[in-house]
Amino acid sequence: MAYNPWRLAFGGMVALAAAMGVGRFVYTPILPVMVEELGLTTSQAGLIASANFLGYLAGALLAASPAFSGSRRTYMLAGLAASALGLLAMGLTDNFTLHLIFRFIGGLASAFVLVFASALVLDQLAASGDSRLSALHFAGVGTGVVISAVAVAILVALGTGWKSLWFASALMGVAGLALAALLITPRELPGNGFSGAPAARVSFALKAMILSYGLFGFGYVITATFIVAIVRAHPELSNLEPYVWVLFGLSAAPSVALWLWLAARLGAIPAFAVACLVEAVGVASSILWASTAGLVVAMVFLGGTVMGITALGLIATRQLSTGDPRPNIALITAAFGVGQVVGPVFGGYLYDQLGSFAVPSLVAAVALVVASGLAGLAAASQSRKAAEAAASVKTSA
């Protein structure tokens, strides 16, 4: 089968939809049903979310190991299989400790899929001059969120219990695994293995981006985890509960193309800085503007930036790397994972103490503003190095 960039990008989209859009984010719409039927506290709900994010951190670090030096496709598919099994296992028990373990496994699997699928797809598209299709690859997360949110909303309306919601999610994960395997075939991936060139020393710009990416992970995750609970806290907004996560996904799916368009004009890192500021407004709106309009702004600004920032961060990492980009992609993904681990525990604990998500949400918004500033420093450093290189070439000539 001849190499087809559209097929490859669509396969990457399917992989991210299954492992990220469903595997990671389906917990948000299922959470209220679990809380109601199992009597979970907000702190317990936050711990389950953080277990997933801790697994994501572990998966990112593991993906950077030299031990995983074989086929990127094989590891991507293994991650998809583990993600589907983790979803299935969630519905097989009501034991809190086992839920922590299974969500940890699901998080580890999703990180594997993100790192290996992105390294595979982005490298292949760049090598063939088809980098513009990376927007299709990253649209997978939003697509998966929409599909899973709609499915959960329909099943909840039909009176489906929390266990069956996890089983349905597992079926979606299996479907994603099968489709990704059909779309991304070994024969059309001449660059399927890793390059032998090692990654170079981490520059100041990359260090700033790694820290910025970690703050982004913290900044978005409190709202993304507890938005349904935030809506439920306002009786006048409770009728919007089935739609908030769908709106998040609908905003996320096409957003990557918009942010990559901006990146083509400003650069990936400046666009990243702008997106962090937009997301900060969305996070603050979820708390400070308790109305239908405020909720719409929050979901559009949050959903419309999460995958854009994710994509821009990974693209910038690839640009700032020499040799095999996988270790640096894994490193920045790990920083993101640290932020995600801290976020839900921090948010859940303060909610239990204060009875509100206002303080943790505003802290998250500030973190996003700081992330934007760090990205600005990274962009300035990158520009300075480019100018120095150009001057050196001119002097040599």
Image (cartoon, grey):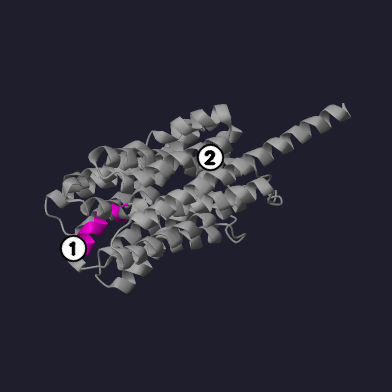
User: Which residue is the extreme one toward the left?
Assistant: 158
The residue under the point 74% across, 32% down is: 387
The residue under the point 21% across, 53% down is: 232
Q: Residues within 10 Å of mark 1 (few under 14, many from 20)?
A: few
Q: Is residue 217 above or below residue 261?
A: below
Q: Main secondary structure of the magenta part?
A: helix
Of the image marks 1 and 2, the number of the one nearer the N terminus: 1
Judged from the image, the secondary structure of the residue bearing numbered disc 2 is helix
Residue 384 in magenta stretch:
no
Quickly name the residue at label 2. 273
- The percent coordinates of residue 87 (x first, y second) are 31, 59
Q: Residues within 10 Å of mark 2 (few under 14, many from 20)?
A: many
Q: Is residue 320 left or right of residue 24?
A: right
| Quadrant in the picture for the C terminus | top right
Quickly name the residue at label 1. 36
389 or 150, nearer to the observer: 389
| Residue extent of the magenta highlight | 26-35
Q: Is residue 121 left or right of residue 149?
A: right
Q: Amino acid at mark 1?
A: Glu
Front label number (1 vs 2): 2
- The percent coordinates of residue 131 (x first, y second) are 54, 32
Say the numbered circle drawn on residue 122: none
- The percent coordinates of residue 337 (x first, y second) are 48, 57
